[in-house]
Amino acid sequence: MLTPVNREQELKHETLQLLREYQESNSAAIRNQLVHLNFGLVRKEAHHWVNQCNESYEDLLQVGCIGLIRAIERFDTTKGTAFSSFAIPYIRGEIQHYLRDRGPAVRIPRRWLALRQQSVATIQDLRMKLNRQPTDAEIAQTLKVSLAEWQEIKLADQNREPLSLDTPVGDTEEGTTSLGELVPDPRYRSFQLAQEDRIRLQQALAHLENRTREILEFVFLHDLTQKEVAELLNISVVTVSRRVKKGLEAMKKLMTGTDD
């Protein structure tokens, strides 16, 4: 019977062997085997994040698997790095980016969220007792909070998600009018330019040499220090620093179309 230590060593050996085969064949079947063998890394990260967000455990597992697959595709067996140490930042980074994208634009205190949820049943009970819509003062009194705080809770809940400036407003004979046209904002153009820059940034990143791109992703996307990246990739901090500088310069040239 295998002990936990022996099982872990066997898993590492089997993973390394499959990674070597995958680098030679790029086989989807082998990649799937690697995902299955190392799925525990995804489960561990998903367990860590599920209690810190409103997303389901299953969704976090799916997102984490994307990070695991990226780690499999980019792992270099000749560097002597443990695959688990290499894969965890990819898995964690993918989950963090997903949560950032899904997170509300306005952060609401947990106490206010709980009171807002409690207010749903409270308002229904008061409506039945009073045979009318309860006032804010009556709701606040039942919830045992001040009127001012209840009104702040309502306002925060209403403004939790922003409206798109492209949201159609009304119907006219000449067609639908967007919110952006009714409320002009010079920052909207800046937002559009930021989205365009993001696309150009991703395209420039894809043109970099693999190791340089990998280092930039660890530093700027996964929030690792240069020292952590050096230890992870088994290279010197000086090498990481040079690669970061070289990568940023290359991306600047790619994005500006200059050779200066």
Image: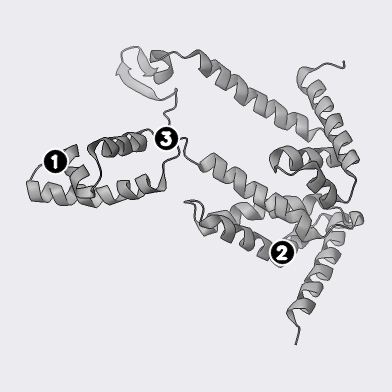
Task: Tell me which amino acid carries mark 2.
Answer: Asn
Residue that mark 2 sits on: 38
Closer to the camera, 196 or 220?
A: 220
Q: Quadrant of the C terminus?
A: top right
Can you see residue 184?
yes
- From this view, report whether residue 11 is shown above or below residue 172: below
Question: Which residue is depicted at the point 64% across and 23% down?
Answer: 196
The N terminus, quarter of image? bottom right
Mark 1 surroundings: few (<14), some (14-19) or many (≥20) residues within 10 A: few
First in residue order: circle 1 vs circle 3: 1
Q: Is residue 170 above or below residue 38?
A: above
Q: Is residue 209 visible?
A: no
Q: Amino acid at mark 1?
A: Gln
- Quadrant of res 251: top right
The x, y position of residue 152, in whole percent, is: 31, 35
Mark 3 residue type: Glu
Residue labelled with disc 3 = 161
Mark seen at residue 133 = 1
What residue lies at 73% left-to-right and 50% top-to-bottom? 70
Position of residue 152 relative to residue 3, above or below, is: above
Across and down, in percent, residue 86 comes to: 78, 54
Give the left or right position of residue 169, taking residue 260 as reference: left
Relative height, residue 218 to residue 203 (above, below): below
* Residue most extreme to the bottom: 1
Q: CA distance from mark 1 to mark 3?
A: 25 Å
Q: Tell me which residue sits at (89%, 58%) in the image.
A: 80
**3D distance between C-alphas at marks 2 and 1:** 55 Å
The image position of residue 109, as x and y in percent, is 41, 44
Q: Is residue 60 left or right of residue 143?
A: right
